[in-house]
Image (cartoon, grey):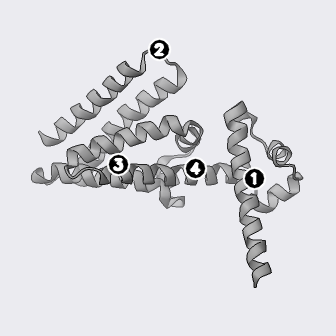
C-alpha cells in the first residue's frame, strides 16, 4: 500500500513539475515558445513521458487555465469576506481580480487570451464560472430592491468585466500611465458602475 501511495505521489509531482515548467517557459519566453519538446528539456525528461501526463499542449493550457480560475476564485472570495456591505464586496472582488491579473499575468493571459468561447469554457470547466457567479450574486443583492431580471444582472456583470478586463489589457500591452492614475481610473470605474446598480 505504501509503495502504491508513493507511486501516486511521484506521478502527481511529475504532473505538477510539467505545469510549473510550462509556466516558467512562458514567463521567460512567452506563450509562442511553449512546446512539448521544450517542456521535456526543461524538466530533463523525454517528450514521450510528457505525453503520458498530457495528450497535447492544449491539455496543458487547459490545466493552467483551471489553475488560474481556482486561484482567482480564492482571491476574490477572500476579498469579499473582508466586507459586509455588497458595494464594498464588489469593489474588493474587482480589485482582487485586478491584482490577480498582474500577479499571475501569464495565467490571466491563458484564461482570457486563448481562442475559446467563454460559454464553451464554462461548460467544460466549472472553475471558470466561479468568479463570475460570485460577482453576479453580489450584483443581484445590490439591485434586489428593484427585483432585477437575470438579463439585467448579466448586463451589469459584463459592464464591470468589459471595463476592468479592458483596462487590464491596455496595461499589459502598453504602460503609458502611472500606477496611481491607473488605480484611480480603476476605482472610479468600479464606483461608477456600483452607483448605477443602486440607482
- Category of crowding for the residue at label 1, using alpha-carbon neighbours closer than 10 angstroms: few (below 14), some (14–19), many (at least 20): few
The residue that disc 1 covers is 56
**Image x and y of residue 53, in percent:** 76, 61
> In which image quadrant can residue 24 be found?
top right
C-alpha span from label 2 to label 1? 38 Å
Nearer the N terminus, badge 1 or badge 3?
1
Please name the residue shown 78% across and 73% down the image. Answer: 7
- Category of crowding for the residue at label 4, using alpha-carbon neighbours closer than 10 angstroms: few (below 14), some (14–19), many (at least 20): many
> In which image quadrant can residue 189 be found?
top left
Looking at the rendering, in which quadrant would you find the C terminus? top left
Secondary structure beneath label 1: loop
Front: mark 3 or 2: 3
Nearer the N terminus, badge 2 or badge 1?
1
The residue that disc 3 covers is 79
C-alpha span from label 1 to label 4? 15 Å
Nearer the N terminus, badge 2 or badge 4?
4
- Between 118 and 52, the one lying in front of the other is 52
For residue 176, which numbered disc appears in the image? 2
- Category of crowding for the residue at label 3, using alpha-carbon neighbours closer than 10 angstroms: few (below 14), some (14–19), many (at least 20): many
The residue furthest right is: 46
Front: mark 1 or 3: 3
- Category of crowding for the residue at label 2, using alpha-carbon neighbours closer than 10 angstroms: few (below 14), some (14–19), many (at least 20): few
The answer to whether residue 168 shows anywhere in this view is: yes
Give the vertical position of 94 relative to 13 (above or below). Answer: above
Secondary structure beneath label 4: helix
Nearer the N terminus, badge 3 or badge 4?
4
Please name the residue shown 48% across and 53% down the image. Answer: 128
C-alpha span from label 3 to label 2? 28 Å
Amino acid at each position: 500500500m505504501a509503495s502504491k501511495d508513493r507511486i501516486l505521489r511521484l506521478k502527481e509531482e511529475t504532473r505538477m513539475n510539467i505545469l510549473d515548467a510550462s509556466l516558467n517557459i512562458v514567463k521567460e519566453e512567452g506563450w509562442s515558445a511553449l512546446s512539448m519538446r521544450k517542456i521535456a528539456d526543461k524538466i530533463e525528461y523525454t517528450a514521450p513521458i510528457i505525453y503520458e501526463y498530457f495528450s497535447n499542449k492544449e491539455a496543458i493550457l487547459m490545466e493552467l487555465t483551471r489553475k488560474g480560475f481556482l486561484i482567482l476564485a480564492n482571491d476574490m472570495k477572500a476579498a469579499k469576506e473582508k466586507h459586509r456591505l455588497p458595494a464594498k464586496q464588489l469593489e474588493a472582488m474587482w480589485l482582487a481580480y485586478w491584482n490577480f491579473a498582474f500577479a499571475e499575468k501569464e495565467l490571466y493571459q491563458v484564461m482570457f487570451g486563448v481562442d475559446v468561447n467563454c460559454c464553451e469554457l464554462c461548460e467544460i470547466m466549472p472553475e471558470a464560472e466561479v468568479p463570475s457567479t460570485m460577482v453576479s450574486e453580489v450584483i443581484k443583492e445590490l439591485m434586489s430592491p428593484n427585483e432585477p431580471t437575470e438579463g439585467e444582472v448579466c448586463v451589469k456583470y459584463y459592464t464591470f468585466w468589459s471595463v476592468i478586463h479592458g483596462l487590464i489589457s491596455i496595461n499589459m500591452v502598453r504602460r503609458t500611465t502611472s500606477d496611481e492614475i491607473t488605480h484611480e481610473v480603476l476605482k472610479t470605474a468600479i464606483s461608477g458602475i456600483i452607483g448605477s446598480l443602486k440607482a
